[in-house]
Image (spheres, rainbow, N blue to C red):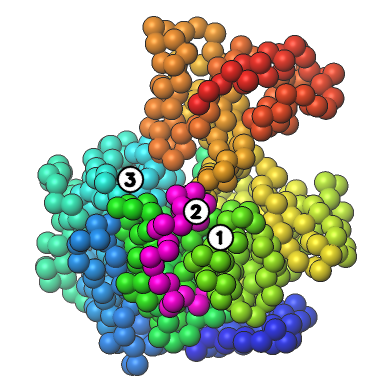
Amino acid sequence: MVPKVSTLGGYIFEYQKSVSNPTGFWANVADSYYWRKKWQNILDWDFRRGYMRWFEGAKLNITENIFERQLFYRANQTAIIWEPNDPNEACRTMTYGELFEQVNRFASVLSGMGIKKGDRVAIYMPMVPELVVAMLACARIGAVHSVVFAGFSAQSLSERLIDAGARMLITSDGGYRGNKTIPIKAITDEAMNACRCVTTAIVLKRTGEDVAMQEGRDYWWHELMQKEFPPVQAAEMDAEDPLFILYTSGSTGKPKGLVHTTGGYMVYTGYTFRNVFQYGDGDIYFCSADIGWITGHSYLVYGPMLNGAKVVMFEGIPTWPDAGRYWEIIDKHQVNQFYTAPTAIRSLMALGLEWVENKHLGSLKVLGTVGEPINEAAWHWYHDHIGKNKCPIVDTWWQTETGGIMISPMAGITPTKPGYATMPLMGVQPVIVDQEGRQLLGNSVEGNLCIGYPWPGMARTIWGDHDRFIKTYFSAYPGYYFTGDGVKRDEDGYYRILGRVDDVINVSGHRLGTAEIENAINEHPLVDESAVVGFPHPIKGQGIFAFVVCTHFSTGGEEGIKNSVRMAVSNMIGPFAKPDKILIVKGLPKTRSGKIMRRILLKIAEGKTSDFGDTTTLLDPDIVNEIVQLAGQLTD
Ligand code: WTA
């Protein structure tokens, strides 16, 4: 069993140990896992080169830690409780024994189809148990999975397939989301046609709709699973062999494929899951995140399953058939720990208490949030109406890059404060720096958040571009990992995350680069250029405000352009990246050297009409007033 801290004193003691002797601390945690061969060296690192290696020389397979390590006593225990999109469709449950059987079978299929250790396999699927089977089967044979959120467009998917050099794509005919059916196979067809690397697709039947199957490339999941492929052994992996690639947006350029490796990721996610949620044997844990994001990877699949947890997996959306769906699921399955995003809480809060009042919610012990800052009103609503004033809230701060939770209360142990991620977890050494890179010591300080020492769960590189990895995370403040977030350490030493300080925006917990959206908008033939900024949005956290420079109009006029701009973004990235507000302008506020003054646009997007600071360096200061006037007339 992974060690668990259960008192505040215990936390303080363990934390001290973890920073005074990090390698000894993590070696002790690692001892609770199953390694075919132990490590020769616990940690070797140099942040300046973006070089971190944990448990070097060790051999393992992460799925042996989920299955073989626990199977003797867990074979008949529930692993997955699957709640379908439609509440009238039957739930499915799978025990660890059954999941193991499926994973082995699918591992044989993959290997029978020619997939070998180190090959990249992309997964683009709805939230169904087979998605977990596919991931774990990849891990079983040492293939590197790359799950792409099934809300991304064909173009985004194909970019990721090409970048990862994926040989195979695992997908489904369609998917359900609320009252919509998503044509998943058609999207993947378009994506596969745009890339040469994918030679095989395995298609799960979910909706039963008619889909085109390409002879020699596309195979049905159910047919392959019935075939007899020779059984395969779990691959022996080095601790530092890649486990998966997951793409995320940055402030510049195309999305980055962050690479997580096997040993450290396993040690870190298993440990943080158990401690943050204070998961106890037999508890039922529900994580509402989609597996297409890091939260689903680390705290729906790997972290919980390394602890033999019973995991509720939900296919649908929180507002369908009505806004009581999450609460109904919690009552139906007697959920003990519930982990979701502030945006979901805010949207349900806005729909009123009537959806909560008729629910019992008595099984809940712990509530969690992730992905964006939680405002105090949403925190209190969650605490009072969902947690009934008796459940601690763990506001967990972390990132795709960090692999697991970094700053967070431990449920029931760390005293909480609304809006605060509170204290660093074991082994995490936060450092706050000012713009010049000077470390801000003591309490009551605010600045940029860095981490001063490696932890086992951190990403090791960007797939195919290590220089970019160094440049993005280790160059702004040499010697530290830079998170891209602003932070405050208050008078009690508590951490409050203030949001991104770079050009990344967080829309409903989805991370998007403003440059990515601008690129999509600029594809429009009538658009000269554009600038995208985030603005405070009551439900989404941040909304997308696009300033679009357009001097020629076609027959549809301004409205026509706005609609086609929205379509362009939807096609190039996905519907979730569509701008909330589009303002057609004649020009952007630029300095004489041609740099867009984003701080002015940010203020305009917030609704400010004056106090734009020093505008003397602007090439054309009048443009600001013009934009302010137009913004005042914006209705949507
Ligand atoms: C933000 C999600 C405030 C932050 C796990 C970070 C948060 C980005 C919190 C990473 C939180 C995540 N409070 N902000 N509890 N958790 N963030 O990679 O800006 O999708 O840098 O990982 O989300 O988003 P990502």
Q: Which residue is mark 1?
A: 381
Q: Nearer the viewer, residue 495 or 196?
A: 495
Q: Which residue is mark 3?
A: 197
Residue at 75% over, 48% down:
476
**Gap in angstroms between the C-alphas marked 1 and 3:** 48 Å
Could you tell me which secondary element the residue under label 3 belongs to? Answer: loop
Could you tell me which secondary element the residue under label 2 belongs to? Answer: helix
Amino acid at pointer 3: Cys
Could you tell me which secondary element the residue under label 1 belongs to? Answer: helix
Q: Is residue 512 left or right of residue 25?
A: left
Q: Is residue 8 left or right of residue 365?
A: right
Residue at 67% over, 29% down:
607
Q: Residues within 10 Å of mark 3 (few under 14, many from 20)?
A: some
Please provide percent x and percent y for residue 497: 69, 56
Q: Which residue is mark 2?
A: 349
The mark nearer the N terminus, 1 or 3, is 3
Q: Residues within 10 Å of mark 1 (few under 14, many from 20)?
A: some
Q: Nearer the viewer, residue 262 or 185?
A: 185
Please provide percent x and percent y for residue 294: 49, 59
Kindly check if marks 1 and 3 are in contact, taking CB atoms under 8 A apart as contact.
no
The mark nearer the N terminus, 1 or 2, is 2
Against 529, is 365 above or below? below
The mark nearer the N terminus, 2 or 3, is 3
